[in-house]
Every structure is written in structure tokens, then in C-alpha cells.
Image (cartoon, rainbow, N blue to C red):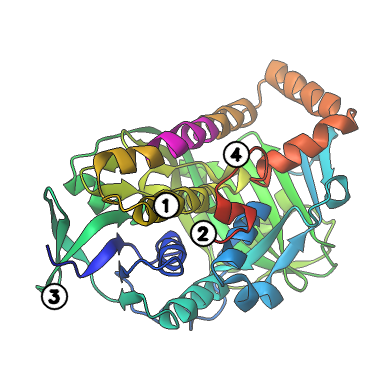
């Protein structure tokens, strides 16, 4: 059978290019089908969107040749402070405080703006001869056969590969066309996302305030700027999103507090509904799902992209090792290795974040007392904290090689 590429990837956001680079650097040919114009995000002005990259994700980016392109624009997270609270009242006296000095690996993570990360992926893909990037293109149909899978493109062309990787988000057309159903539910919450410039330096400290209506994350960016991920009830968020910038800041200020001095908006404002959505299977004949296409989670711990990069590391390792052994990389037993590796971990983390959100997104006095006590106990036992940090950083246990910073 003639193949246009070993692996065809639908979705050119972040997980798709990461997977493409991991595979291409190991000798496989890859075609990335990207619905967005090639330079739309890379050339954009700062719009407020940014990602919290765990240590393991930074190692993966280093292993696939991307990190050096963004290192100068990455803000290290040196401390994380988590507390309960109510708008205008300040944080609870019981809180969790994690410091980078508690582990040997350095900063607990890095904040990187979307525009810088996407531009780095785009430059890396353009420099890789084993990658064909098809921007402003979508898949309209797919058909799996015994020896390969064929996709039909929006421009009328057809491409055939050994494997199709769906990196096309929560509304994955790849999953839908394969007949993969989903399980999930809404949270009745909407995330308001923006960035603010502030008067005082953040000193690399990330803050997570648990408010009755939902969590508020204040995440450090380069310079005196921070990324805001603010969860509110759907009705309240809709009303806040409709406000002009000045009125929006007036609502944000009592929640944000004054510890960073005066604040002003920097970039645009976004909102999106929050829900949990899990694919009932990560694989189908000749097909594997990655990132949000497999598991869309609550942003409470900023783990969405990190979970996707864990998928990338696992799938790339499975496919590359199978290729080197002379196996059919799209065979069912090969793809099942990926599902076995990733599904339990991703589902457990997704449900864990779901539980934390439900525990904290309320003003029940009994639950408030219980969670404050729990945070107080963990905060008072220094021996527990490094384990929490390593788990959140993705370096606990034995992660895929790429997430250890090792080449495939």
C-alpha cells in the first residue's frame, strides 16, 4: 500500500505539532492537518492566553527541540500558594505553600504565552523535513482499512497513512467519525481568561484562590504581568463578560486583592464554559486520540496541556518502538499499548480535579472547615510537600522517555 505519511495528525494547535516533532525526529514521516492559517497565532499580539508548563512538559519540549526557542519568554514558577477565600475578604489563614527549593529539579513549572509556544512549534515543524504541514485545511471524512487509514481533506485531496492521530480538541471530529462516544458533564461554571499588568513584581509566585463560585488562578508571566483564569457560575460569568473593561476590572479587584498593587488589563478577554468530557476509548482501528480529544478537564490545576503532552510522550514512544521492531504501527495491539498506558492516569487525574472543584466551589461551612483543616495539616507537614510537587510536575513514577528529557 502506498502511504503519504506514516502518521497523519488532525489538529495543529499544540499537541499535534508536539507529536509530529517527536515522531519526525525519530524517523517517521508525518502530515499535520491544521484548520488555522499557519501564521495566525504566531504573529498575533499578546492576547492574554498562556499555559502553565510542568517540569515534565519542559523536558519534553527540550527533547523535541522546542524549548530553546521559548526559554527567553518563559516565566519560572518559584512558589505556589493555594488558599480558600471569599471575594473581598482575603485568603483563609489555612493555606498550602509550595516552594521550588523543596525539590532538586528547579522551578516547579513555567508560564509561556500561547503566541510564543505556537510560534516555536511552527518554526520547528518548518525546519523538520519529515513533517508536512497543511494549514487552513480540515478533514471531512476518514476511512480505516486493514492496512491503513485514508482521510479526505476540505480541498478535495485524499491522504493515506498507517495511523491517524486525533489532536483536534474536545469537539474532536476524528473521534466522532470513528464512532467514539464520550462521557462527561458540565460544571455550571464559565472560565474568564485574561492577563493583567500590575504595579508590584509577582516574584514568580502562582496563586490559587478557591472562591465559593469557583477557583481564581493568578499565574505569573514575564515582567509585571499575570495570567488570570477566573471561574464563575455561568450566569454571573455571562454578566461579567458583557461588561466593558473598566467595569470588568471593578468586579475583578475585590477577588484579586491589592497584594500586587494597581492592576490594568493587558491583552484581550476570553470566556469558555467548563465541563468534563472523556472519550470512552482512546483508540479505534488505525486511530488514536491525544489531549483534549481524549480528555477535556477542569482547568483548576492548569493540567490540560500537561496531560496532553503526557499522551504525546506515550504515543510517540509506543509508535517509534513498534516501528523499530518492524511491527505495523497501526495494528490494534500496538495502539492498545498506548491506551493501556494513558487512559487510567488521565481519567484518574480528571476525576481528581473534578472532586477538588466540587469540594471547594461552594460555601458550605462544614466543607469549608474540613478543607481548611486539610490544607493546614498538609502545610504543617513538610515531608509531604515534595511528593505533591513532583506529582503535579509530572515527574513522579516513570513517565514516558520524552517527559524525562530523553530522546526516543
Q: CA distance from mark 1 to mark 2?
A: 8 Å
Q: Residue 155 — which label?
A: 3
Element type at mark 4: strand
Tag 2 residue: 408
Residue 233 drawn at (x, y percent): 51, 40
Tag 1 residue: 321
Q: Residues within 10 Å of mark 3 (few under 14, many from 20)?
A: few
Q: Which residues are magenta?
A: 339-350
Q: Residues within 10 Å of mark 4 (few under 14, many from 20)?
A: many
Q: CA distance from mark 4 to mark 2?
A: 40 Å
For marks 3 and 4, the one nearer the N-term is 3
Q: Residues within 10 Å of mark 2 (few under 14, many from 20)?
A: some
Q: CA distance from mark 4 to mark 1?
A: 43 Å
Tag 4 residue: 214
Q: Is residue 25 left or right of residue 326?
A: right
Query: Is the residue under label 2 in contact with that under label 1 (CB below 8 Å)?
Result: yes
Residue 92 appears in the picture as rendered: no
Quarter location, residue 380: top right
Q: Residue at x 25, y 68 (%)?
A: 5
For marks 4 and 2, the one nearer the N-term is 4
In this rendering, is residue 208 above or below 127?
above
Q: Is residue 11 left or right of residue 66?
A: left
For the residue pair 231 and 167, the one nearer the viewer reads as 167
Q: Could you tell me which quadrant the N terminus lies in?
A: bottom left
Q: Residues within 10 Å of mark 1 (few under 14, many from 20)?
A: some
Judged by its main secondary structure, the magenta piece is helix
For marks 3 and 1, the one nearer the N-term is 3
Amino acid at each position: 500500500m502506498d502511504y503519504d505519511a506514516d502518521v497523519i495528525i488532525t489538529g495543529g494547535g499544540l499537541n499535534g505539532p508536539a507529536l509530529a516533532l517527536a515522531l519526525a525526529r525519530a524517523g517517521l514521516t508525518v502530515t499535520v492537518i491544521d484548520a488555522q492559517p499557519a501564521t495566525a497565532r504566531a504573529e498575533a499580539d499578546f492576547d492574554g492566553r498562556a499555559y502553565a508548563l510542568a517540569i515534565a512538559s519542559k523536558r519534553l519540549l527540550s527533547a523535541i527541540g522546542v524549548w530553546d526557542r521559548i526559554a527567553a519568554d518563559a516565566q519560572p514558577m518559584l512558589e505556589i500558594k493555594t488558599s480558600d477565600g471569599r471575594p473581598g475578604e482575603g485568603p483563609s489563614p489555612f493555606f498550602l505553600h509550595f516552594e521550588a527549593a523543596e525539590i532538586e529539579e528547579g522551578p516547579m513549572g513555567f508560564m509561556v504565552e500561547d503566541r510564543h509556544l505556537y510560534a516555536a512549534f511552527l518554526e520547528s515543524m518548518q525546519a523538520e523535513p519529515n513533517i508536512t504541514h497543511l494549514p487552513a485545511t480540515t478533514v471531512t471524512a476518514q476511512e480505516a482499512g486493514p492496512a491503513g487509514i485514508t482521510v479526505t481533506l476540505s480541498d478535495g485531496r485524499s491522504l493515506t497513512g498507517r495511523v491517524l492521530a486525533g489532536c483536534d480538541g474536545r469537539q474532536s471530529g476524528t473521534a466522532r467519525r470513528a464512532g467514539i462516544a464520550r462521557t462527561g458533564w458540565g460544571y455550571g461554571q464559565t472560565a474568564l481568561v485574561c492577563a493583567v499588568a500590575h504595579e508590584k513584581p509577582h516574584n514568580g509566585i502562582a496563586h490559587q484562590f478557591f472562591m465559593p463560585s469557583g477557583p481564581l488562578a493568578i499565574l505569573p508571566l514575564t515582567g509585571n504581568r499575570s495570567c488570570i483564569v477566573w471561574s464563575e457560575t455561568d450566569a454571573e460569568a455571562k454578566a461579567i463578560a458583557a461588561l466593558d473593561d473598566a467595569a470588568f476590572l471593578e468586579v475583578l479587584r475585590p477577588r484579586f486583592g491589592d497584594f500586587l498593587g494597581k492592576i490594568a488589563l493587558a491583552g484581550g478577554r476570553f470566556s469558555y464554559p467548563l465541563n468534563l468530557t472523556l472519550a470512552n476509548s482512546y483508540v479505534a482501528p488505525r486511530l488514536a486520540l491525544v489531549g483534549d480529544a481524549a480528555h477535556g478537564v477542569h482547568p483548576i490545576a492548569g493540567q490540560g496541556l500537561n496531560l496532553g503532552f503526557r499522551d504525546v510522550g506515550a504515543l510517540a514512544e509506543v509508535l517509534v518502538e513498534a516501528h523499530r521492531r518492524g511491527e505495523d504501527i497501526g495494528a490494534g495491539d500496538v495502539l492498545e499499548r498506548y491506551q493501556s498506558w494513558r487512559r487510567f492516569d488521565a481519567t484518574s487525574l480528571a476525576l481528581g480535579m473534578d472532586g477538588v472543584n466540587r469540594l471547594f466551589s461552594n460555601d458550605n461551612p462544614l466543607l469549608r472547615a474540613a478543607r481548611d483543616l486539610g490544607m493546614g495539616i498538609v502545610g504543617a507537614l513538610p515531608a509531604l510537600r515534595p511528593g505533591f510537587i513532583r506529582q503535579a510536575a509530572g515527574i513522579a513514577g516513570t513517565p514516558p522517555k520524552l517527559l524525562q528529557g530523553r530522546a526516543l
